[in-house]
Image (cartoon, helix red, strand yellow):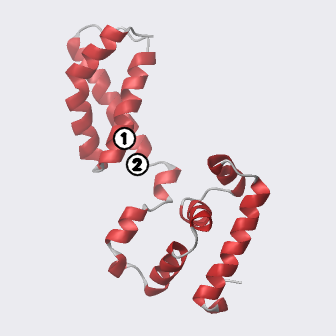
Amino acid sequence: MRNEQEVNRAIDKYSDTVRRLCMIHLKNYADTEDIFQTVFLKYVLSSVSFENDEHEKAWFIRVTINACKDLLKSFFRSRTISLDDIMECPTELPTDYREVLEAVFSLPQKYRDVVYLHYFEDYTAPQISRILGKNVNTIYTILTRSRQMLREKLGGNEYGYE
């Protein structure tokens, strides 16, 4: 593990490079910040000794690019769409999808959170129970009740809900 002085020096020296590489690959500020932290955490925990400054810089570049690629090909990233993206382009969404989304957003907060995590972020009920700090059976109950509310708002089985 590296000492604080080494880490601060590396952050001062390579932070711009790491951020620029992340923005080029990810085109997203939040993901850039996540990868930035990941890269410097790897640096803190690594025991690699560098031959010179060029070798160290090459290590940062390689680790940053690999972390960006890992994020871009991750299961989570390929299976989700952020709420910001959905709300920025509501006219481009299919009408059925837009209606379902509006119905979900009209649910009370505790139902909306569980429905969003389950259907939009693909979390299971046990995972949601850990995230929200609720009993797993409570999550199942909320999902059942929210499905019923959505069924009523969307007019029964018109959209394939049972």
Q: Quadrant of residue 88 in the image? A: bottom left
Choose between 85 and 109: the one closer to the eye: 109
Q: CA distance from mark 1 to mark 2?
A: 6 Å
Q: Does 20 sit above or below residue 5?
A: below
User: How far from the left and from the top, in percent, is residue 15?
Assistant: 24, 28
Res 68 label: 1
Answer whether residue 160 is visible to the viewer in this image.
no
Q: Amino acid at mark 1?
A: Cys
Query: Which x, y percent locates residue 51?
Result: 28, 7
Label 2's element? helix
Is 118 above or below relative to 104? above
**Between 50 and 31, the one nearer to me in the picture:** 31
Local secondary structure at mark 1 = helix
Mark 1 nearby-residue class (10 Å; few <14, some 14–19, many ≥20): many
The quadrant of the image that shows the C terminus is bottom right
Residue 38 point in image, percent of width and height: 41, 31
Q: Residue at x 49, y 76 (%)?
A: 101
Residue at the image point whose x is 54% and y is 74% from the top: 104
Judge by depth and name the residue closer to the eye, 123 or 139.
Answer: 139
**Left or right: where 93 falls relative to 129:** left
Name the residue at 62% across, 56% down: 123
Q: Quadrant of the N terminus?
A: top left
Percent x, y of residue 96: 49, 85
**Horizontally, is 28 left or right of 118 in the view?**
left
Q: Is residue 103 left or right of residue 59?
A: right
Which residue position is annotated with label 2?
72
CB-based contact (under 8 Å), mark 1 and mark 2: yes
Question: Which amino acid, by three-letter code, is at mark 2?
Answer: Leu
* Residue 118: quarter of image: bottom right
